[in-house]
Image: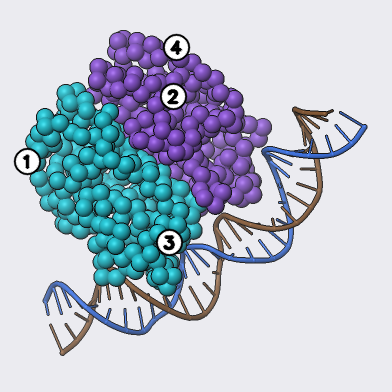
Chain colours: A purple, B cyan, C blue, D brown
Amino acid sequence: MPLVRKLGAFVALSGAELAVLEGLRKRRRTFVAGRDLVQQGQSDQAAYILMSGWACSYKDLANGQRQIVDFQVPGDFLGLRSVLLHISDHTIEPVTQIEVTEILKSDLLEAFANTPRLALAIFWAVSRDEAMVVEHLVGIGRRNAAERLAHFLLELGARLTLIGQGSKEGFDCPLTQYLMADALGLSAVHVNRVLRHLREADLLTFHDGRVKFIDYDGLTDFADFDPSYLDQGGPLLV
Amino acid sequence: MPLVRKLGAFVALSGAELAVLEGLRKRRRTFVAGRDLVQQGQSDQAAYILMSGWACSYKDLANGQRQIVDFQVPGDFLGLRSVLLHISDHTIEPVTQIEVTEILKSDLLEAFANTPRLALAIFWAVSRDEAMVVEHLVGIGRRNAAERLAHFLLELGARLTLIGQGSKEGFDCPLTQYLMADALGLSAVHVNRVLRHLREADLLTFHDGRVKFIDYDGLTDFADFDPSYLDQGGPLLV
DNA sequence: ACCACCGGCTGATCTGGATCAGTCCGCCGT
DNA sequence: ACGGCGGACTGATCCAGATCAGCCGGTGGT
């Protein structure tokens, strides 16, 4: 289970805690690509754990544009932030067909009260999510298009590597250039051009749903990518 | 105490919980403007509650630029996110002279285990912080300079109103145009021009450390400002 | 068999905001 | 009393990336 692998990067969970996580397996649901799970403005009573497939969370603006805040890959929480806020501030949309496990708000509060270590693990996951959003903010605010795109793909690669779905060679990527543009604050046209530049610079390729890192170290250097904000340093007892 | 006022927007805290918050009052510290509290790359064992003054959190880039992620006002936590991450991913710098209360990691973990409602309140505060960062991301990614600046000042106004230091008339603002530029992903030159445009459009003025909203509703409309992400709807029992 | 649509890809043109290069004023230190 | 400095403010120029307009190939619907 990707979530266990991910949380394992933070804390070695005990048998009892794993049992609670396993206990969640019951309420499985499937969503097709494009149909929103959670909508901006809605008041939520549930969050989800993504079991398979990719999703994205975004905000709509009055002028019709949208900004994708982050993509979620297996093992990530969906909508966790809006469980405690009175209404959801964003929309969650599956990018591919996805399988999720529903977590009711009540279960979450119970886990908080009864399994403090699990609560800490969830707190860590939220902190890590926030750190990723912060890094995206820095990217959009201060990196140019090429650095931003390279950084973005390196981050996805690192996150997928953690759950065993990527490596320094590359990863399978179901995103369109339009989706990347919405996430990076660029136009799709420009994403296309920048991908060409990166290909011509022998840094990476992106074809047929597959990202290949040609020169991983060169790319890391080019994008000024320091993965420490992903906090994947390995498990540490609290 | 501004923190109690702020958390009160989320949950009515019991006497025992207030006592725990009061118990934190002991380890008070003061910092002068400009001297970092927490540095990027450092491994942290403490967070802080801001009692008075303003601070900002930012990330440095390899090319010498920086991106301010958010400003903190009284009642806000400083460095909470990096308590659980192995190393801090950002720097915190006081904007004015500030007073803080130190919270040791151990105290925080204890509060998590023993006062679950307080833990929830803290969880809420982190979620709200993340929601603000997300809104900044949307602003930088998709709003033009004028909308972005207007939105930014409206957000600060709403946050300060919550702790009794602002209103729809305006608020005292110790920020320089350079600091705003670093937060908004703009150049200081352009911030200056945009402030002039907003003044000439009779929307707001910013002079001598004071923001005055001339036409609050017009400004809200102009910036497409919907404060629901700040989750200041009023207390609700969990 | 055809056409509508989506995603990738490209060239030409336009523009918001950066950058450069200053001025002016008030404050602080000596 | 003087120089240095930080912050507000301005005009001129430049450029990264948006926008517009269009082509191409695959695929799904009828």
Mark 1: few/some/many CA within 10 Å (<14, 14-19, 20+): few
Circle 3 chain: B
Quadrant of the image occupied by residue B197 = bottom left
Q: Is residue B238 left or right of residue A90?
A: left
Q: Which residue is under mark 1?
A: B26
Q: What residue type is labelled 3?
A: Gly
- Is residue B143 placed above or below B49 in the rendered structure? below
Residue in the foreground of this view, choosing between A238 and B99: B99
Q: Earlier in the sequence, mark 1 or mark 3?
A: 1
The residue tagged with tag 3: helix, strand or loop?
helix
Q: Which residue is under mark 3?
A: B218
Q: Which of marks 1 and 2 is in front?
A: 2
In percent of width and height, residue A119 lies at: 29, 23
Quadrant of the image occupied by residue B134 = top left
Circle 4 chain: A
Residue extending furthest toward the left? B26
Q: Is residue B8 left or right of residue A156?
A: left
Mark 2: few/some/many CA within 10 Å (<14, 14-19, 20+): many
Q: Are marks 1 and 3 in contact (CB under 8 Å)?
A: no
In percent of width and height, residue A75 lies at: 44, 23
Q: Nearer the viewer, mark 4 or mark 3?
A: 3
In percent of width and height, residue D8 lies at: 33, 72
Q: Are marks 1 and 2 in contact (CB under 8 Å)?
A: no
Name the mark on residue A48: 2
Circle 2 chain: A
Asked if labels 1 and 4 share a chain, the reply is: no
Asked if labels 1 and 3 share a chain, the reply is: yes
Residue at the image point whose x is 31% and y is 14% from the top? A17
Q: Which amino acid does label 2 sit on?
A: Tyr
